[in-house]
Amino acid sequence: MKVIFEEYSGIIITAVAIIALIAVVGLLLATDGPVHTAFADLIDTLFNQAKVS
């Protein structure tokens, strides 16, 4: 095990970091995620303010 971690520690850390980054972006962009909710609210506000009365 020690030899494996000495030789491949950089690759293992990089792979874990990339997987974690993909998971975080996926959660943020999910249907009920904060980014999706904020964007939907922004679009709704824009169209509500742009309505001609």
Image: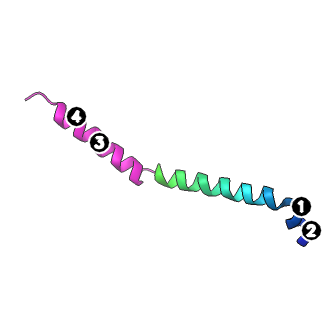
Q: Main secondary structure of the magenta part?
A: helix
Q: Quadrant of residue 12?
A: bottom right
Dot 3 and dot 2 residues touching (CB under 8 Å): no
Measure the C-alpha gap from mark 2 to mark 1.
Answer: 6 Å
User: Horizontal placement of 34 versus 49: left or right?
Assistant: right
Q: Nearer the viewer, residue 52 or 13?
A: 13
Q: Which residue is outermost to the bottom?
A: 2
Q: Is residue 38 visible?
A: yes
Quadrant for the N terminus in the image:
bottom right
Tell me the tag on residue 47. 4
Tell me the tag on residue 7. 1
Number of other residues with Cα within 10 Å of mark 4, as a class: few under 14, some 14 to 19, many 20 or more: few
Measure the C-alpha gap from mark 3 to mark 2.
Answer: 53 Å
Q: Secondary structure at mark 3?
A: helix
Mark positioned earlier in the residue sequence (3 or 1)? 1
The residue that label 3 is drawn on is: 42
Measure the C-alpha gap from mark 3 to mark 1.
Answer: 49 Å
The residue that label 2 is drawn on is: 3
> What amino acid is found at the position of numbered circle 3 in the picture?
Leu
Number of other residues with Cα within 10 Å of mark 1, as a class: few under 14, some 14 to 19, many 20 or more: few
Q: Is residue 32 visible?
A: no
Dot 3 and dot 1 residues touching (CB under 8 Å): no
